[in-house]
Image (cartoon, grey):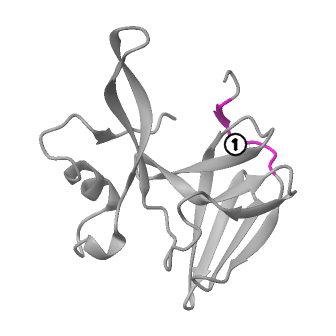
């Protein structure tokens, strides 16, 4: 677990055509690690800030959008030597950066004390209003709770 979260560095470059959504993903290095997503003639690029996982089995990616972190819909599977969709995104018809990274308190019964853990919150982009960001939507997912998106640290 000591290598489960690290700053993005040298990662394999590659691409993936997600047939379920007709989305093309590309991963490349250009002054850092970037992911490009193309669907229906629209392309967007996101700089990868963090890598989740040791890389022994797989690596997931976190991108910064504004001051917040979101999980990439893409993973690199080491044993397969290729990129594929992250768990839960396999049959998504419009994969996007919709899983906000949040801190959520939970009760750790083993230790018998409260602690915190990282949690991913799904956001349905179709539910966003024209002036609402994914961050605002993530904050509204659990009214009255302490679940809030994590601020990215520079």
Identify the residue at the far front of this view: 110
Quickly name the residue at label 1: 8
Relative depth, front residue between 151 and 115: 115
Residue 40 placement, left or right of 75:
left
Residue 151 picture quarter: top left
| Residue 39: percent from left, percent from top | 57, 84
Residue 141 placement, left or right of 84:
left
| Residue 103: percent from left, percent from top | 37, 33
Identify the residue at the far left of this view: 144
Q: Quadrant of the N terminus?
A: top right
Relative depth, front residue between 130 and 88: 88
Label 1 packing within 10 angstroms: few (<14), some (14-19), many (20+)? some
Residue 3 placement, left or right of 146:
right
Q: Residue at x 43, y 28 (%)?
A: 117
Residue 122 picture quarter: bottom left
| Residue 53: percent from left, percent from top | 68, 38
Relative depth, front residue between 49 and 104: 104
Q: Residue at x 26, y 70 (%)?
A: 128
Q: Main secondary structure of the magenta part?
A: loop
Q: Residue at x 69, y 42 (%)?
A: 8
As displayed, is residue 128 above or below residue 138? below
Residue 108 placement, left or right of 43:
left
For mark 1, give the secondary structure: loop
Residue 73 picture quarter: bottom right
Q: Residue at x 65, y 70 (%)?
A: 36
Residue 54 covered by magenta stretch: no
Instruction: Specify the segment rendered in magenta.
Output: 4-11
């Amino acid at each position: 677990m000591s290598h489960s979260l690290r700053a993005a560095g040298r990662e394999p470059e590659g691409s993936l055509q997600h047939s379920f959504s007709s989305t093309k993903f590309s991963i490349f290095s250009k002054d850092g690690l970037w992911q490009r997503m193309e669907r229906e003639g629209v392309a967007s690029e996101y700089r990868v800030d963090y890598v989740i996982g040791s890389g022994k089995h797989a690596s997931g990616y976190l991108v910064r959008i504004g001051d917040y972190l979101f999980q990439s819909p893409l993973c690199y599977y080491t044993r397969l030597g290729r990129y594929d969709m992250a768990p839960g995104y396999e049959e998504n018809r419009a994969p996007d950066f919709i899983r906000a990274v949040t801190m959520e308190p939970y009760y750790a019964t083993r230790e018998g004390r409260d602690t915190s853990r990282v949690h991913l919150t799904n956001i349905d982009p179709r539910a966003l209003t024209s002036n609402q960001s994914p961050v605002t939507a993530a904050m509204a997912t659990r009214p009255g709770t302490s679940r809030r998106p994590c601020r990215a640290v520079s």
